[in-house]
Amino acid sequence: MAKKSVEKGASLVKVKLFKSKDPKYSAPVRVYVNGKGYAVPRGVEVSVPMCVAQVLANKERQEGQASSLIDSLAQAQ
């Protein structure tokens, strides 16, 4: 995990991001929280601060909702 710094006392959680040969899903995911940047690699389990894990979970949830909306709009036509 490449990062600028982890504050002392920050709770770490393990995450593993999907990786494929598709360029969209092979590069590290960049996350910025309160001015600190993190590059989370794909395909390996890494420990990240809880705030980074929350951003990644929100991103996944929002992508799922957007995909569902796009599908429902396509079926309506």
Image: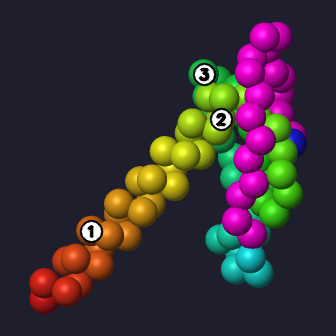
> Going from the N terminus, do you reach mark 2 or mark 3 first?
3
Calculate the distance from the C-alpha at mark 1 to the C-alpha at mark 3. Answer: 30 Å
Q: Percent from the top left, x then y, of residue 49?
A: 73, 29
Quadrant of the image containing the C terminus? bottom left
Q: Is residue 24 above or below residue 62?
A: below
Mark 1: amino acid: Leu
Which residue shows up at 81% across the image and 21% down it?
6
Mark 2: amino acid: Val
Count of residue discs: 3
Q: Percent from the top left, x then y, of residue 44?
A: 85, 57
**Left or right: where does residue 5 sit relative to residue 25?**
right
> Going from the N terminus, do you reach mark 1 or mark 3 first?
3
Q: Percent from the top left, x then y, of residue 30?
A: 69, 46
Which residue shows up at 77% across the image and 41% down it?
14
Mark 3: amino acid: Asn
Q: Which residue is mark 3?
A: 34
Quadrant of the image containing the N terminus? top right
Calculate the distance from the C-alpha at mark 2 to the C-alpha at mark 1. Answer: 26 Å
The reply to whether discs 2 and 1 touch (Cβ–Cβ < 8 Å) is no
Q: Is residue 64 above or below residue 37?
A: below
The reply to whether discs 2 and 3 touch (Cβ–Cβ < 8 Å) is no
Numbered tag placed on residue 52 in the rendering: 2
Quick one: 52 or 24, which is closer to the camera?
52
Q: Nearer the viewer, mark 2 or mark 3?
A: 2
Q: Nearer the viewer, mark 1 or mark 3?
A: 1
> Going from the N terminus, do you reach mark 2 or mark 1 first?
2
Kindly state the secondary structure of the residue where label 2 is placed. helix
Kindly state the secondary structure of the residue where label 1 is placed. helix
Extent of the magenta region: 2-19
Residue 28 is one of the magenta-drawn residues = no
Residue 9 is one of the magenta-drawn residues = yes
Q: Which residue is mark 1?
A: 69
